[in-house]
Amino acid sequence: MTVVQRPWWKDGVVYQIYPASFKDSNGDGIGDLNGIISELDYIRSIGVDVIWICPMYDSPQVDMGYDIRDYEDVYAPYGTVQDMERLINETHDRGMRIILDLVVNHTSDQHKWFQESRSSKDNPKRDWYIWRPARTVNGERKPPNNWVSNFTGSVWQWDELTQEYYLHLFCPEQPDLNWENPETRQAIYKSAMEFWLERGVDGFRVDTVNMYSKGEMLDAPVTDPGSEWQPAGLQYCNGPRMAEFLAEMNAVLEKYDAMTVGECPNTPDMKRVLQYVSAKERQLNMVFQFDVVDVGQGPYKFQTTPKNYTLPHFKRAIARTQDLIRPPSDGWTTVFLENHDQSRSITRFTSDAPEHRVAGGKMLALMMAALSGTLFIYQGQELGMTNFPESWDMSEYKDVDSSNYYKMVAQRTNNDPTALAAAHKSLQHLARDHSRVPMSWSTGPHNGFSPPDAKAEPWMRPLEDANVCNAKQQKTNEKSVLAFWKHMLQVRKEYSDLLVHGQYDDLDVEHPDLFVFSKTWKGKKAVTICNFTDKAQALEFPRQVRDEKRELLVSSVDQPGDGELAAFEGRIYLLA
Ligand code: TEU
Ligand code: CA
């Protein structure tokens, strides 16, 4: 089989849509498929090639659709399968492609497979999920191991009816499928993949893809002595049968020329990541590593304070993802700073102070457009949307991840007000909720997310700053973050050899304020320089490129100074 050097998914720019929060067409306060269809021209105008739709499947929404009840149906408030068919066609009509979220590590506990599985020990689908008897420790019933779930508490849920535990790496309402069972795997391919591939989708973002093979499920070492349940991500990710499962899955995907981008948490071993993305291994086209978005996080994601990292930390994380394509690698990589599991990048990595947010948003756009790999933009990022403010109280946080964390802190500290204030503060910085607020479309009622005469309030509170940050106003403002993104995506296309495919080198990893990196491609070279501080900095190039002749390709500010970079200014130079 010949390997295509530039398949469509390498140069493509992907725009991620969170259906609940993108656009509400019928005024029930929840985004929907008709809302997405109505904004396809807007999306196209940004310069995007592919849209990725977060789970729109039938679901009880314990984890916002990552708990799927029926792969072959659509969550009713979002629309119907017919609406999806229309969305697929309308996307294709505009020359774009569409990928869906493939969530097959687990289902909802309301999926009919699980309903059958839990009904009796000898049900034919019993083995489709992961059931284990209890351990007895000092006469007490205990789960089979000590693993902590991604949303706090044990990964094991006791089921009274059949007197066994089942495994759930996420919520108890998200039981893990048993990938060891070949019949289960075939059912997954048919229901979750082929059903939609037959309807024309162009690929999948593959949720928690490295968790399918769980290995021996032994106790994890105690790294959190205050808890009975221990982090075990390094054990349940990247298990022994991953390559085999992915090869099997790929046989289905290749029939449709479908692309895959796999979510790849808990994988510090770069050799492992390289295997997943290597072209000749044929496992996944590319992955989302967590290196960059984990910068500044504590041992448990939220156990930290805002901006608890240095610029060299950030640069080293970027280097780890960029190095995936360094020769002799035949792999591919991704560029992203945001998604529905992350708070906003301007807040995290620059400054969301009113005087800096536009500059910060533009600089990050420039930096991302200059990095190699497939570029992913999350809805609202193109407008420079930021986190919601500290003044919003805990009732505005709707995500199970946030509320479980807050409850855990309350329980562990006996409701200590200082600890709870710290928990609130870290959530204000890192909670998944910040990316899930309604899109700010205009200054109208509900920020234009719902129609003016909507019968219900939006499911999450809209941001208060739509007067300075909304799509309608930015479309006609050439100085807007949106206008700059459009420009950068054009620049990226025009110089795709260097910017999308070039080899990355950090020119001064230890510099605490400036991020300077080069991209090279067959004798051509570009240098990107970004000022990550809120003050002007002298424009000084590292020795490797100091004496080279250079021509300014683009700056993120209107009037770039001669010997100085403005606060949060980025530039790309072409070297002669
Ligand atoms: O996320 C899986 C994941 O590993 C994390 O990013 C997760 O969100 C984090 O541990 C919580 O702090 C995927 C989805 O992107 C996420 O939205 C789902 O909640 C999760 O899988 C379960 O399907
Ligand atoms: Ca709606």
Image: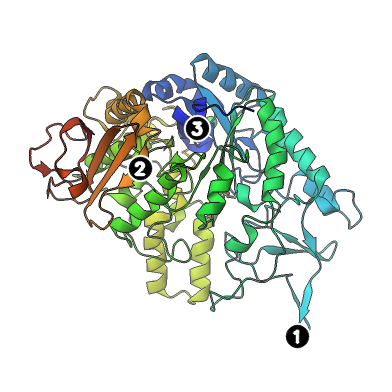
Q: Mark 3: which secondary structure?
A: loop
Q: Mark 2: which secondary structure?
A: strand
Residue type at mark 1? Asn
Point out which mark residue 504 bears: 2
Residue 474 in which image quadrant: top left
For the view shown, which residue lies furthest in the bottom direction?
138
Q: Is mark 2 within 8 Å of ligand 1?
A: no
Specify whether 36 is left or right of 128: left
261 lies above or below 540: above
Q: How crowded is mark 3: few (under 14 residues within 10 Å), some or many (20 or more)?
A: few
**Counting residues from the N terminus, which is met first, the one under dot 2 or under dot 1?**
1
Q: Which residue position holds label 3?
A: 455
**Residue in front for this viewpoint, 135 or 551:** 551
Position of residue 187 measured from the top left corner of the image (x, y, whole percent):
79, 39
Q: Is mark 1 within 8 Å of ligand 1?
A: no
Point out which mark residue 138 bears: 1
Residue type at mark 2? Tyr
In the rendered image, is residue 30 in sight? no
**Counting residues from the N terminus, which is met first, the one under dot 3 or under dot 2?**
3
Quadrant placement of the C terminus: top left
Q: Residues within 10 Å of mark 2 (few under 14, many from 20)?
A: many
